[in-house]
Image (spheres, helix red, strand yellow):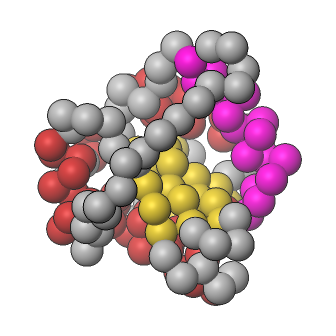
């Protein structure tokens, strides 16, 4: 199992390549912008899994004082289903728990049954809520 540690700025190219390989990069979210924003706010909740100088996974967590959030949980496609995603999530959960976070929320794009099943295996349940969004950046 690779080491899980806090993100460092020199990880950025590999992390963006990871997110791209996992299909997490979409036109309205510029990954370098998302990384810069995370480094400006709670950078200690951004983790990568690294082995032999290769970034194999990532998870970006946040806590707003009410709920924790998970974004960019990713594992290289050729390493998926080997326990790394679970280990990253456990690491993020422990970090959130340590700062008093009582509940974690996350969003999964509709129709992504494999990812929904993964989170359900980790104990997540579908909340009876409707997720609403509004772009403030004009994208």
Q: Kindly identify the residue that appears in the image at 42 percent across and 66 percent down.
A: 89
Which image quarter is the C terminus in? top right
Q: Is residue 29 above or below residue 113?
A: above
Q: Kindly identify the residue that appears in the image at 70 percent across and 37 percent down.
A: 35
Q: Bounds of the magenta span? A: 28-44
Residue 60 located within the stretch drawn in magenta: no
Magenta span: chief secondary structure: helix
- Indicate the quadrant where residue 108 lies: top left
Q: Nearer the viewer, residue 87 or 56?
A: 87
Q: Kindly identify the residue that appears in the image at 67 percent across and 34 percent down.
A: 34
Q: Is residue 124 above or below residue 131?
A: below
Residue 16 is situated, as x and y percent measured from the top left of the image, at 56, 29
- Indicate the quadrant where residue 137 lies: top right
Q: Is residue 132 above or below residue 93?
A: above
Residue 57 is situated, as x and y percent measured from the top left of the image, at 45, 49
Residue 8 is situated, as x and y percent measured from the top left of the image, at 73, 49
């Amino acid at each position: 199992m690779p080491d899980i540690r806090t993100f460092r700025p020199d990880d950025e190219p590999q992390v963006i390549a990871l997110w791209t390989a996992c299909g997490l990069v979409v036109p309205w979210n510029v990954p370098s912008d998302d990384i810069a924003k995370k480094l400006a706010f709670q950078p200690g909740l951004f983790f990568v899994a690294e082995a032999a100088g290769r970034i194999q996974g990532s998870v970006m967590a946040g806590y707003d004082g009410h709920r924790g959030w998970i974004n960019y949980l990713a594992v290289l496609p050729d390493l998926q289903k080997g326990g790394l995603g679970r280990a990253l999530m456990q690491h993020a959960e422990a970090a959130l728990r340590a700062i008093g976070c009582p509940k974690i929320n996350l969003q999964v794009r509709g129709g992504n049954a494999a990812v929904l099943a993964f989170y359900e295996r980790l104990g997540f349940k579908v909340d009876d809520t409707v997720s609403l969004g509004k772009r403030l950046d004009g994208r």
